[in-house]
Image (cartoon, coloured by chain):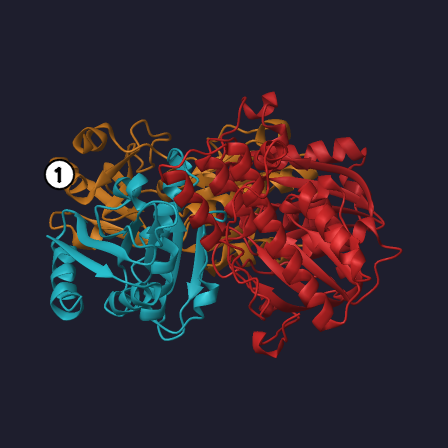
Chain colours: A cyan, B red, C orange
């Protein structure tokens, strides 16, 4: 199952991220894909705003540091914002590094360029792909459950039913 | 006073040794030792997970270069705030072991403080407080008002991509090497900076924050389009747009803060266009620009040692139980956040 | 002979000091090795009246276990050794789980969580006196199902020893199970007796030891 959503402005894309973020339970892993400039980090800002109270200007590209941690105020959980952009391969120490973060049951993880390696690290995740269109501000967003997991299939169905259908 | 400084905030493992706060006796950075046989040959671009393997070698190499032994060290400083947690903990653990075994004080510094001190180390006689500091690097772009040792006000920061990241992403998309900044600067020399009118994001807004993802996107859109282009022109125009934004905002801050001294720090501070444009434009407004030595611009241990020298005196030593924070905004230290709305446009 | 022993692989950060293989003092703190382990070392040495300069070796658990914890501990240990110019004795957490005491089972299965329902696992036979035989030749990463199958095959002769919380409580078939939250200094001393000492030069490149996923697991992925 894949849900296709269209947005016409950056604000709408951010709002979409918020409504999805608000529905993510602790332990959720979200993969963000799309070409450079599509708006993966922008979507991450929306997601974090939906998850809880956190200054969105502090949600920045983790391309350099690889992993950013945000202590979101309204939850006793940490949001880990990860970026695989700079990784050409996943060595065993890399695997151990990321697994320690991705396996935390009380965290929510957002991974940009997920398509590169996330499938090697977790059995399933919520995949959000942002694509550009001919109109510069408009985006097409595909949401699906990657991997084989009833939990994520069910999360996707709930999202579709509760928040995505109107788009 | 001889201080060992260790920096393992992200990719590079580095140790530097500095005497009396500014005399660099050694500065060893792992990426520059990539081909060293001790590390088994070429180190891949992402070396962040090699810190544990490399730290002992790097420390020893620094001490050999400085011709000192452990008993010659008076203190050890280490970056313990801002970076990748797994990388940071390695440097901090090594620093604590040295402090414990040698019986010398330990100083933890925020990684960005290290960059600020890279400038102070080069100009300690003349750079007086307060001054403005623009720090542009791979993971950071921020404007700070430096009031005193260890006392900073954050005036503005990037809301999405750091300037260095924008350079790396554009460079990669153009098929250039890593690090992207150097590659783009080289290519730009044969290009026309006026060929493309890339956006200068947020340049007219009165606040002092930065945003480079829009500029990055504009470059990507051009490269994705059917238009033919010269890489040299794209590089030159992109570099010009980044420089324009950084210089304009910095001088706007200097004016609103009433500061005539401007420091430039971070990995992007080696960029020739940025250095010259900032210096020229600042001089027109009666401001003086202070640059660090090029070898102290990228992440390195010597700047940490320099910072440690001053902060040991002004903040005192830290206990062995000092923690490690991966994503500490400078606001958690002696920094007061300023509300952007207070600023008038230049 | 004075030795310093450090473990940051499991839930506790444990430091001990021993003289001629007898424990003189120890400190164990739940979690936070990045902050605590060095002050634990300092405090334990002071409490036992042993000077850093008297140390002859540093024993360090190099894995498996918490990746962050291991990097902190290995770096702490080998840097100390680099300054003091003493030997480093690397030991495995699984070896240390079964060392230093006698057991009533003929076979021991030591496990430690590898995340997502998998474990690092090593088997040991005990001799007639109940002491685990040193060394493990088949330490691997397994799923809980695979572990369960192995234990079923052992048919009541094996004791499962968990380091920290792992899949033990979810297993349906398990003849005996023991959960250990921290390694005892005696266990670390016993494991160190079989360790290959590294001189300070060799120890300089020491890194945490980790295990490859078992061949079966890798094949299953293809």
Front-lying residue, B338 or B333: B338
Is B245 rendered above or below residue A77? above
Quarter of the image that includes the N terminus of chain C? top right
How crowded is the residue under tag 1: few (<14 C-alpha within 10 Å), some, or many (20+)? Answer: few
Quarter of the image that includes the C terminus of chain C? top left
Q: Residue at x 61, y 31 (%)?
A: B190
Residue A150 locus on image (x, y percent): 11, 54
Residue B177 locus on image (x, y percent): 52, 31
Q: Residue at x 53, y 54 (%)?
A: C34
Q: Residue at x 81, y 48 (%)?
A: B122
User: Is residue B93 shown to the viewer in this render?
Assistant: no
**Disc 1 designates what residue?**
C149
Which secondary structure, mark 1?
helix
Residue B22 located left or right of residue B265: right
Extreme-right residue of the structure: B125
Q: How many marks?
A: 1
Front-lying residue, B99 or A3: A3
Indicate the quadrant where residue B227 lies.
top left
Front-lying residue, B280 or B263: B280
Residue A160 locus on image (x, y percent): 13, 63
User: Is residue A98 shown to the viewer in this render?
Assistant: yes
Is B244 rendered above or below residue B286? above
Residue C28 locus on image (x, y percent): 49, 58
Front-lying residue, C104 or C92: C92
Which chain contains the residue that carries disc 1?
C
Residue C204 located left or right of residue B62: left
Q: Residue at x 56, y 50 (%)?
A: B163
């Amino acid at each position: 199952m894949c849900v296709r959503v269209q947005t016409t402005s950056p604000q709408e894309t951010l709002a979409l991220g918020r409504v999805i973020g608000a529905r993510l339970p602790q332990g959720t892993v979200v993969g963000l894909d799309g070409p450079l400039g599509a708006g993966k980090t922008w979507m991450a800002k929306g997601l974090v705003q939906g998850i809880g109270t956190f200054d969105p200007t502090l949600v920045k590209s983790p391309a350099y540091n690889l992993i950013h941690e945000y202590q979101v105020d309204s939850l006793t959980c940490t949001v880990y914002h990860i970026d695989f952009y700079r990784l050409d391969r996943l060595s065993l120490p890399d695997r151990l590094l990321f697994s320690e973060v991705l396996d935390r049951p009380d965290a929510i993880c957002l991974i940009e360029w997920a398509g590169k390696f996330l499938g090697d690290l977790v059995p399933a995740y919520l995949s959000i792909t942002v694509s550009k269109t001919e109109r510069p501000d408009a985006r097409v967003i595909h949401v699906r459950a990657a991997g084989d997991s009833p939990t994520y299939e069910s999360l996707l169905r709930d999202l579709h039913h509760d928040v995505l259908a109107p788009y | 006073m001889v201080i060992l400084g260790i920096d393992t905030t992200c990719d590079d493992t580095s140790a530097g040794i500095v005497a009396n706060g500014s005399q660099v006796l050694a500065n060893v950075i792992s990426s520059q030792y990539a081909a060293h046989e001790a590390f088994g040959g070429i180190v891949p671009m992402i070396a962040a997970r090699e810190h544990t393997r490399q730290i002992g070698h790097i420390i020893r190499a620094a001490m050999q270069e400085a011709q000192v032994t452990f008993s010659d060290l008076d203190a050890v400083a280490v970056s313990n705030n801002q970076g990748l947690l797994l990388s940071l903990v390695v440097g901090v653990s090594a620093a604590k072991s040295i402090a414990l075994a040698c019986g010398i004080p330990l100083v933890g510094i925020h990684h960005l403080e290290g960059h600020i001190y890279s400038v102070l180390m080069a100009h300690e006689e003349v750079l007086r407080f307060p001054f403005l500091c623009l720090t542009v690097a791979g993971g950071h772009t921020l404007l700070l008002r430096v009031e005193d040792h260890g006392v900073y006000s954050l005036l503005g920061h990037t809301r999405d991509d750091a300037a260095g990241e924008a350079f790396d992403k554009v460079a990669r998309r153009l098929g250039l090497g890593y690090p992207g900044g150097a590659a783009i600067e080289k290519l730009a020399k044969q290009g026309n900076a006026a060929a493309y009118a890339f956006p200068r994001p947020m340049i007219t807004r009165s606040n002092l924050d930065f945003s480079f993802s829009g500029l990055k996107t504009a470059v990507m859109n051009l490269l994705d389009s059917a238009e033919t282009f010269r890489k040299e022109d794209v590089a030159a125009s992109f570099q010009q747009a980044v420089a324009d934004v950084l210089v304009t905002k910095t001088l706007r801050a200097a004016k609103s803060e009433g500061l005539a001294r401007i420091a430039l720090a971070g990995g992007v501070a080696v960029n020739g266009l940025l250095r010259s444009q900032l210096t020229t434009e600042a001089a027109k407004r009666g401001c003086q620009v202070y640059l660090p030595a090029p070898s102290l611009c990228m992440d390195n241990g010597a700047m940490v040692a320099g910072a440690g020298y001053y902060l040991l005196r002004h903040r005192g030593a830290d206990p062995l139980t000092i923690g490690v924070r991966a994503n500490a905004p400078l606001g958690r230290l002696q920094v007061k956040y300023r509300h952007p709305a207070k600023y008038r446009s230049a | 002979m004075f030795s310093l022993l450090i473990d940051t692989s499991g839930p506790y950060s444990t430091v001990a000091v021993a003289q001629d293989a007898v424990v003189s003092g120890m400190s164990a703190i739940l979690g936070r090795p990045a902050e605590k382990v060095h002050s634990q070392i300092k405090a334990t040495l002071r409490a036992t009246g042993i000077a850093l300069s008297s140390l002859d070796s540093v024993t360090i658990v190099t894995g498996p276990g918490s990746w962050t914890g291991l990097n902190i501990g290995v770096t702490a240990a080998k840097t100390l050794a680099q300054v003091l110019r003493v030997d480093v004795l690397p030991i495995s957490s699984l070896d240390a789980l079964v060392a230093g005491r006698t057991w009533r089972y003929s076979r021991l299965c030591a496990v430690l969580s590898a995340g997502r329902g998998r474990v690092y696992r090593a088997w040991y036979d005990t001799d007639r006196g109940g002491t685990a035989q040193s060394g493990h030749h088949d330490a691997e990463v397994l799923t809980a199902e695979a572990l369960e199958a192995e234990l079923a095959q052992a048919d009541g002769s094996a004791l499962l020893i968990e380091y920290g919380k792992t899949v033990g409580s979810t297993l349906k078939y398990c003849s005996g199970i023991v959960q250990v939250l921290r390694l005892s200094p005696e266990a670390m001393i016993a494991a160190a007796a079989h360790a290959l000492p590294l001189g300070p030069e060799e120890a300089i490149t020491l890194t945490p030891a980790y295990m490859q996923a078992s061949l079966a697991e890798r094949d299953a992925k293809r």
